[in-house]
Structure formats: structure tokens, C-alpha cells
Image (cartoon, grey):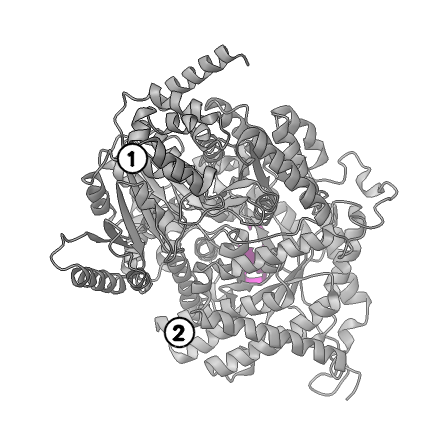
Amino acid sequence: MSHQLLDKSGEPTRDEPWIFRTYAGHSSPKTSNALYRAGLERGQTGLSIAFDLPTQCGYSSDAAIARPEVGKVGVPINSLDDFHVLFDGIPLDRMNTSMTINGTAMWLLALYVALARERGVPEAALRGTTQNDIVKEYLARGTYIFPPEHSLRLIAETYEYCVDKLPEWNPSNICSYHLQEAGASPVQEVGFALANAVGLLDLVKARGRIDGDAFGRCVGRLSFFVNSGIRFVEEMCKMRGFAELWDEVVSQRYGITDPKQRRFRYGVQVNSLGLTEAQPENNAWRILLETLGVTLSRKARCRALQLPAWNEALSLPRPWDQQWALRLQQVLAYETDLLEYPDLFDGSPVIASKTAAIVEGARAELERILAMGGVRAAIDAGYMKSALVRSMAGRIARIGAGEQIVVGVNRWTEALPSPLTAGGDGGMFQLDAAAVGDAIAALDATRAARSSARVAAALAALEAAAVSGANLMEPSIECALARVTTGEWADTLRKIFGEYRAQTGVDGQSLDLGAEHAGRLRARVEAFVAARGRRPRLVVGKPGLDGHSNGAEVIAVAARHAGFDVVYAGIRLSSEDIAVSAIEEDADLIGVSILSGSHLELLGQLMTALRARGGGDIPVVVGGIVPKADLATLLALGVRQVFTPSDYQLGEVIERMLDVIEAR
Amino acid sequence: MSEASATEAMAATIAAARRGDKRAIARLVTVFEDARAPATIARAAVLAALVDRPLGRVVGLTGAPGVGKSTLVGALANALVDGGEPRVAVVAVDPSSPITGGALLGDRTRVRFGADDERLYFRSQASGAVTGGVARVTHQVCRLLARLFSTVIVETVGVGQGEIEIVRIADSTWLVVQPHGGDAIQFMKAGLMEVPDGFVVSKGDLGAAAGATAGALSASLRLAAPGAPARPVVVTSAFSGAGIGELAAAIAAGPRGHLGEKEPYFFERWVLDEYGRAGLRRLATLAPTTAAYLAHHGGLDGAQAAF
């Protein structure tokens, strides 16, 4: 075997690089369009669109629950008019567009198709991906809307539509990414993702709406979205094992023989979980190393890559931060010799053995879930969610105990001040507060200009199809063309399908707080019980639309472990819901978790809601990604403690919460 | 706080609770959960101030873990107020950790009440270190809530074949089973089928399976107790809403007002907890019956203070 990569005629060649993407979008369609155009000019080769939480959860920007979140973690899209602005000057037929969208994926795909129709671009020329993976929303990310049965129907119907009309579109992207962010081990990540893919393909097959040939093409369009962590050798083996197992599943379970349809295709965003707020400049190295895990092995190299920015644990990235991340991809692909070789690891006994171990574990995990009745039954039973919460709790305990070293966090914590955060902005991005106003003004203009008769007819047709079981794509495209809004589309389906609340995963979990903290905490709690006649009572919840529930769940489990009575109120709550919960439960403390950057608005609302109901004396603490600059504002609002990613010692966090309770 | 101003504050809290103020109700519930001895006196004072209010009905919902009790209880409470019940409270009991004593109470996540619906009140409760599906304090809290709400629903910890303590508290107890669950068979084996006053087959959206389970259940009830009055079997779906109205109507037509009769049992249990079997023997020497002892001391709180 030659060390040289040869083309078909036997000449030395080098591989084309993967697609370079940057996950981006915020404030408004106009701002985001400028961001995309600048990124493309700098050498990005594909788009990765971040939508704001109201768009992801099926609300228009002017809905009460949407207001604090508009434009925060992504771009708000209310109607086709917004899409025209978002893609202004971007040629759809030459673009590869990835949309991180799930609960409303069908709607955003319908908008994209409608945009192509109005621009005269053939639908068949559209290339890209809608994430459209609802299972991981139930497990880790939280932006689901409908119950599983109906959500899965929407996903299956996008496959049934795309297979002939948009043959180069990936209708969904099975995400193991968020499972790793939620604490999954490599074995869990691969096993759960494969169970998810099997569940989807079994469903598409069982619906029987496409023939065998089209089913093969559906299998060929199914792609994965994967995470890459800091243990990069293991991550590389994970990807080799993932590809092996996928081939096994596709050929054995579905009898697919065409090598093109069997190919394991995946995109990557490298790990955010391990990025630290402390000494944030070190994250640049972490991101580089995590990139190696998904690029070094040719056999298991990603097809598209997006990198977080070094300051992700501090705030959304600034344009310069994103450019710096893109430059890493360009240096790796174009300056190094990586793309000149065949696979570097074939024949390595170490890699083969490590890969085999992951394959074996993941296959067992897959079989366990299939034996439970498949991924849906496993969700209903809370099996995967519980496993993830347990894994995450274990990780946090190991970091707390110093068994897992995190540089700058639990070792070598003394450091010189970073010039990267010394600028006037502190190395952080500031959102344009006028965005909400712009989004709502555009929405009002759309409503004023559209034909209400056409809107009513389009929504009636959507509702009829939802009831009859006909494919919802074409009615959704007509809704898009008629200038139906995101909220109207989702509300119509909510009426028919209902809304879903996922398993919490917190039941029956335990957590190690470390012997020293646990002993001291329990003694303090017992003293509290003796003095007050009851256990400290903590209400934990997540206000707003951000569904990343790990933080809230870990705190709930840890506080229970310390002897608290913890009322877990859940996620996607209004501030009023949390205030009423705390009042009805006679809480000693409220703990809220917010990762969307909406902490100032949401805490303001919560404090007002509490005062309005006579609960202004119930203390509130918050955890999440909170820039230092916001601390003073939060304290002025009356928040008693603010916990950020640098507060990784759970025992300490719970002690500080108990301090607040005892100070009442 | 001086004693006089504490009494004044308590009077204000009671007055606010009578008006339906949730903050005040929640604080009173805490008094009824308070494990310290002086709380007995406070409870007696609160109940004395509420004695003019009619005693509401207490309904128990019990069943194995995962049968959908929490989801059902939310839908049922909404259906009861929609059907004309003035005020409904839910007490949802979840297990405490036997090791740490702490509890994770997650039932709120599955219940949807309008944030400011004054007719509905939800309270989570930790079971503490007891088995049987309810906490030691559940009965106490029901004594309070039955004076403030026309219906109080107690959702128990998911129980298996163990004792169902809830029947000691509730005016009527419903056993929730799910299609294919096999729970009914387990209860039958344990000789517990005689205990519930009615049965709910949840997850009725599973269609034929739910119907089949309900049919089998009705048949075996007839076999088990031929000639006895038929007990209702209702198939519900919290998702579609099917059967919820029927269940609410059956509950609203059911018995109420018997909570006071349960006090001798709970007093004896309290004596047993606090003083052991010697305590029970002493109680037997003090009065001909426990009910007579309670009557002599003005009820449960007075008896506890006196004993």
C-alpha cells in the first residue's frame, strides 16, 4: 500500500476539504445576512443558520413568551419575507445550507422551498440539511413542540417529500452532538444515535408511502451530526466505529447494497461542554485538538465542520472570534499535508482494538434499546434521559474531586491576565437591543400586506391535512407563500397534535457531592430541619424557551442529595409559572437556570411576577452563562447568587444556596 | 415576633387563605407539615378558625409507577372546576430518599394549570421515611385543604402491591391502571381489588388495548365479588381528554365529608410512632375507645397535646 493518495488514473492527488461552516445568526434577518455574506467572503463554503428560540419553538416574535428571547441565540424568522432578507444576495442553487431547526423543521424547509419558488430557483437544486431530529430534543435540547408520534410523522413526511423533489437535501440529521453535551460517553453517543436512526428509518419504511428504490435513497440521505470531545484519539476511534456500525445496520437491517447509499456521512460541531470560562484563551487549543479527532482519519473524516469560538463560555462570538475559528479550518486543510494521504490508522492494532471496544459497547446499547421496543419506548420509559443525567453527574463529580483534570479550572488556576479579554468589550459580544423592535415591525408589515383570505385558506388546508394524515409539506409551502407566520403555522398544528412535556430524567438519580461537602451539608440540613420543622424547600425551573436542561437537572439532583426537598418545575416555563410554583410550594428558595442570554429580561420578569403575587421575599438564585458585566444588574434586581460555569464545585454551589436560605 | 403579633399575623394569614390567597394557603400547608411539637397548637387554632367551612371531599388516586397518575390528575382537576366544582387542590406525594432524606418532587412538570387560576392549587409533598404511598403529614394537610377547597385530590407515590394507606384518608379511592400493565392482576393477587372504590384505565389513546383491559377488569371484578354493587371502570386519555369528564362527574357525585371519622386511626398511628406499643396500651386505659378519647380532648390536635 502506498502512502500516497492516488486518483482514478493513478496520479497523486489530494482530497477536497470538508465544508467549512460557521454556526451563526442573531438579532435580525438583515444583521444575519450581513454576517453570512462576510463569512462567505472570508472563505466559508457553507452556511449554518442559528435560529432564535421563538422560531425553534414555533412562536412569532410578538408572542409574550417569545419577547425576552427574540434574536438572542439566533435569527428570528416570522415569515417568508424574513427569508427573502436573510438570503438576500446569496445564490440558493450554489449554496449548501444547514439549518439547526427541529420542532419547526418542516416549516423552515417549507419556507426555503417557497423562497426558491419565488426566486425561480429549481427545487431540485437545493442542497443542505434540516437538523430535524426530535429525539435529541426530548433528551437534551428541549425545543420540542408536539408529542413524539406527531413529531415523528412530520420528520417522516419531510423524507417522503424530499426523496423525489429535493434529492440533494438531507431531510434530517441524527444528532449525537447534544447527547455528548448532555454527558454521554462515546458508547452511549453512538448507541443512542443509531437507535434513533433505526427508529426513523423503521417508521419511514412502515408508513409504506415510498417504494423500495426511494427508501434506499432515503437511507442515503440520512446524515449524522456528531460531537468531538477533547479525548481526541478516542473520538477518532468513535467515528471509525460509528461508520462500521452504520454500515452493519444499513446492510443487515435494511438490505441496502448501493455503496453510495450506505456511506456514513456526518457533520461536526466540536465540543462546547469542555470549553471553560476560566482562562478562556486555552479553549483555542481545545478546539484545535477536538478538530483532529474528526479530521485525522480519512476513513472517518467529517463532511462538514463548524467550530465554536474560544469565548463561547463567555458569550456569543464576535465576528472576529468566528473568523479566527474559520482560519483554523483553512490552515489545517490547505497548509498542512493532511489531505494528501490515505487513511493513517489502518493497520494500527491500538486503534483497531479501541474501535472494536466502542463498536461492541454501542451495539449492545443499540440492542438494549431495540429490546425495550425502540427509541420511542425508551424515551417514554425515561431510559436514555436517566442514563444521560447520570453520566453528566458523574463527570461533574470527577471534576469536582480533581480526578478529571481541567486546566485552569481545577489545576493551574493561577494565570496572567489575558489580553484577549482586556479590550473595551471584555472579549464579549453585545447584542443589538433594537432587534426585537425590527423583528416585530417586519412582522406587522407582513401581516398588513398579505391577503387574509389566502392565509385563512392555507391554514385551513394545513389543518385538514394534519387531521387526514396527508403529507403536510405542500400545505406548509402554500402557508409560506401566503405569508402565514411561524406562530400561526405551529399553533394550527398544536391545536390538532397537542403539546408535549418530556421526561425529566431526574427521578431516581444520585450524585456524589464529595465526602467533605456532603457531610457538612447534611449536618447543616439536619440542623435546619430541627429548627424549622421541615427540610429546605427549593423550586428549580427554567424560564423562557431555552431547553438545555442539564444544569437545572444536576442542581436538582445535587440538592436532593444534600437533603433538600426539591420541587422540579421543569423547562420552558413562563416567569409567572415559576412564581406561582414557588408560592404554592411555599419555597425557601428559587433556583433558575438560563443559558440563552436572556437572563436580564427573564429575571426582571420573575421578580415582578413574584412581587405581584406577594412572593417578593422568596430569594432567587440563577445559574447559567452570565457575563460578569451583568452581575451588578442581576444583584440590583434582587438576585441573591449568580452561578456561572466557573462554579463547578457542586457541593459549594449547594452550600451557597443553603447560606441564602438560612439568611432569610 | 411577640406572641400577640404572631397571633395577629396568623389571623391575617387565615383570613387571606379564606379569600383564596395562594401565598397564605401555602404557608398554612407548611404549618400542617411542621414536625415540631408546638405546631399541634397552631393547627388546632387554624382549624378552629375554619370550622364554619364545609368539609370538602378527599379523593385518592393511586397506582403503580408510570401509569400516568400525574398527567391524569392535572386533566382531572381542570375537568372538575370546568364541571362546576368551586375549588380543587392537588397534593402530589413523591418518595424521599431513605439515605439522604431529601426528595425530588417532579409531578409539577406534568400538570398544566393556568398560572393564575384561583380555583386550582397544587402542592408537592415528600413521602418522608414511610411506605404506603402517602406521607405522615398527608392526612394533616388534607384536614386543612378540605376546609379551603371543595375537592382535594391526593396523588400517591407509585405503589406496587404494598399497602394503600390512602384509603385511610380519602372519601373515595381510585386505582389507576394502564393497558397491558398487568397491575390489575398484581392487585388481585395481593387481595387488594376490594379496596378501591373505582378504577381508571389510563392511556385510553392506546385504543383497543385500553378497552380490552377495561373489559377484563370489569369481568374479574364481577367474578371476585358476585352480587356486590358494580364499581365504576373508566377509560381515560389525558391527551385526547376522553373519559376525563366522565371520571370527574363520578367523583363529583361521590362521597364527601368523612375526613373527621378518620382521626382515631391517625391518632393511634401517631401514638404508635411517638410512644410505641406501650403508648397504645396506655391509651386503652384512658378511654373506652380512641374516638371517645378524641372527643374528650376536642379532636386530634387536642388529643395529641394532651397525651
* Percent coordinates x, y for residue B165 in the rendering: 35, 47
Q: What chain letter is assigned to the residue under label 1? A: B
Q: Is residue A266 magenta?
A: no
Marks 2 and 1 on same chain: no
Farthest front residue in view = B285
Q: Amino acid at mark 1?
A: Thr
Residue at 62 percent across and 34 percent down: it is A527
Q: Amino acid at mark 2?
A: Lys
- Towards the viewer: A72 or B78: B78
Q: Which mark is residue B289?
A: 1
- Badge 1, how many Cα within 10 Å: few under 14, some, many 20+? few
Residue where numbered disc 2 is placed: A205
> Over which residues does the magenta segment extend?
A87-100
Residue A428 sits in which quadrant?
top right
- Towards the viewer: A523 or A154: A523
* Percent coordinates x, y for residue B164 in the rendering: 34, 50
